[in-house]
Amino acid sequence: MLGVSRSGFYKWVQAEPSRQELLKTQVMERISFHFQDTKGRYGSPKITHLLHQEGFRTTVRTVSSYMQ
């Protein structure tokens, strides 16, 4: 019906999240924390700086897109 094999579908459903997906989730949680902690006063440049201090390697552009 959808052009996908049954075994392929179940393999996709049971797949573990990738390292990149896990990292994105962690970064988004930290962005949300910092945004709420600063009562919405910090934008992407300052939050990026805070993330760099925590050891995350990310760019202002990435943080900005995650914040939208």
Image (cartoon, rainbow, N blue to C red):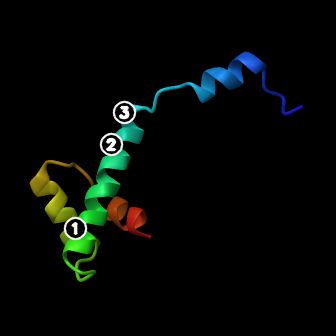
Q: Which of marks 1 and 2 is in front?
A: 1
Crowd class of label 2 (few under 14; some 14 to 19; many from 20; radius 10 Å) = few
Residue 45 visible at all: no
Secondary-structure class at tag 1:
helix
**Which residue does the image show at 26% across and 53% down from the upper left?**
58
| Tags 2 and 3 touching, CB below 8 Å | yes
- Amino acid on which disc 1 is placed: His
Residue 27, image x, y percentages: 30, 52
Say if 68 sits above or below 12 in the image. below
User: The N terminus appears in which quarter of the rendering?
Assistant: top right
Per the image, the residue denoted by label 1 is: 34
**Which residue is identified by label 3?**
19
Image point (84%, 33%), residue name = 2
Which tag is nearer the camera, tag 1 or tag 3? 1
Residue pointed to by mark 2: 23
Q: Residue furthest left?
A: 53
